Amino acid sequence: MHIIEINQLTKYYGKSRGIVDVSFNVEEGEIFGFIGPNGAGKSTTIRTLLALIYPTSGSAKIFGKDCIQYGPEIRREIGYLPSEVFYYDNMKVLDVLKYSASFYNKDCKERLYELADIMDLDLNRKVNDLSYGNKKKVGIVQGLLHSPKLIILDEPTSGLDPLMQQKFFDLIHEENKKGATILFSSHILNEVQKLCHRVAIIKEGKIIKVEDIETLKQSNYKKFRIDMTDTITDTYFDVEGVTNLSIHDQHVTFLFSGDINVIISQLSQKRLKNLIVEEPTLDEIFMHYYVKEA
Amino acid sequence: MNIVLRELRANMKALIIWCVMQVFLIYVGMLKYAGMAEAGNSVNDLLAGLPEIFKTMFGLSTFDLTHVGGYYGVFFLYFILLGSIHAVMLGAVIISKEERDKTADFLLTKPVSRVRIITSKLVAALINIVAFNLTTLIASIIIVDMYNQGQSITGDIIKLMIALFIIQLIFLSVGVGTAVMTRNTKKATSVSTAVLLITFILSMAIDMYSKIENLKYLTPFKYFEARQLMFGGQFEAVFIVLSALIVIVLVTVTYIFYKKRDMQV
């Protein structure tokens, strides 16, 4: 069964674009990455799924039911972590979490304390005394305490330190093993690659691609930046796998995907002043997708 | 139920302050009455000498201030002003604060319908204005009784508090109505208090110029006046119907708008 089924979903805010014709499905039990730069429409899609905003056209189903019409019923089994976390400032963390738990017809107390313990969250502090990262932790506990079947995470890792990110990823893996489906939005390719089974790429409100993470990994791009000792012609880099080549005198940059040894042996024939190999930014990857499609 | 409790707790402090203020106002007011009653008719003579506009502004035009009922009638004007300010602010804020504090993404992603959210918030607001009203009622009965040497006016006080309650209801619905239509707390509170002040000033203008008497249907402050309700007077059916209509229309609008709107981040 499709846990999420999005069908030509379109949302305009007045005249400005939110998302256009977004369609994809999320299957039961998978961790689905939703990736794109800021302002691409990730949050718009997610907030429509949660009926916080209404679609201009198109529709979406969760658990096979229309997400607007059956909103309250569907949301019993959804845990949601918003990208920006805000909670009632004057309340203690424990009270916020208890308030959150009071909406579900089950006893979430044990899980609440368990999660707070894992995330190392002080329950007795007031929300407005918390740092951004700690608020994020409140959000995580709040989103998971009722053991939902579908977990929707909107850029969950921003503000968390690496140790906490790791604990959080473990937690997500564990929930997934217990059967939860996860929709994970992010603008960091790396973290999506680590966690997700499949990924949808969105840019400027449109889905560019829905792809298996394995396929994405195979087209694993590296960005090369090289300072040569001599000027060089662009035919020298006429190697399979080189894209986005630019040469300014002795300074060369390009993206490379394929067998790393091929390009290294090619480079070893020249004297280099400097060589930097790095992960391309998301934008560069997206650039590539555009080039590929054109 | 959980939303109602949450709202009651969130508004508890403000409510207590309002109620204490109200009791204090009544106490100080009646203390002043004791002085006036002793001075006797000279007070009325003094007031008679004041310009009409001045008297209208302070609600002094028609009452015998040396009589406890007359004095309380003047007081009532301040109660409805305070009661309506309390109600209008409460209504405007209770709805719009979720978006102001950006907690809408929390509350609305819980398994509750928007209708239930509005209903819960209205119930909580209703409990607040009832508490305000009952405090005013009980404090009035007790404190007036302390200074009253003549006949009891408890019956009149109860009648006035019913009028106060209807006006509170009207302004609560004005508050929630503007909150869903204006989409943010600042605008909601300023628009709804503007409505309140304009209708209040209009009610005073009507007192001063009898020519515009027909405008009285536009301002809730003219619907139930102490001088008409006290001393054996009655509620006018037309104004009760009008009040009910205003409340029903605004509350319906609140539900419809809130159900349809996009929550802002």
Image: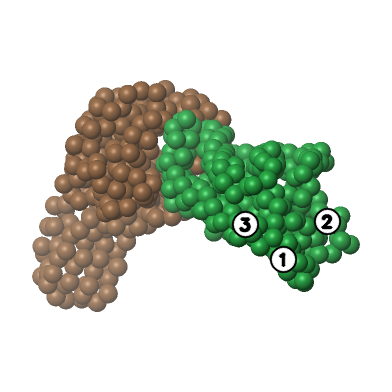
Chain colours: A brown, B green
Q: Which residue is mark 2?
A: B215
- Disc 3 from disc 1: Cα separation: 14 Å
Q: Earlier in the sequence, mark 2 or mark 3?
A: 3
Which kind of residue does numbered mark 1 sit on? Ser
- Residue located 44% across and 44% down the image: B12
Residue B33, numbered circle: 3
Q: Is residue B21 above or below residue B125?
A: below
Q: Position of residue B181 (x, y in %)?
A: 63, 50
Ranked by sequence position, the earlier of labels 1 and 2 is 1
Q: Is residue A45 left or right of residue A288?
A: right
Kindly give the residue lying farthest to the right in the view shown: B211
Residue A10 can be seen in this image? no
Q: Mark 2, residues whose alpha carbon is within 10 Å: few (<14), some, or many (≥20)?
A: few
Which residue sits at x=25%, y=66%? Answer: A253
Pinpoint residue B226: horizontal percent, then vertical percent: 73, 49
* Depth order, front residue of B84/B64: B64
Which residue in the protein does label 1 denote?
A: B42
Q: Nearer the viewer, residue A75 or B226?
A: B226
Q: Amino acid at mark 3?
A: Tyr
- Could you confirm whether marks 1 and 2 are on the same chain? yes
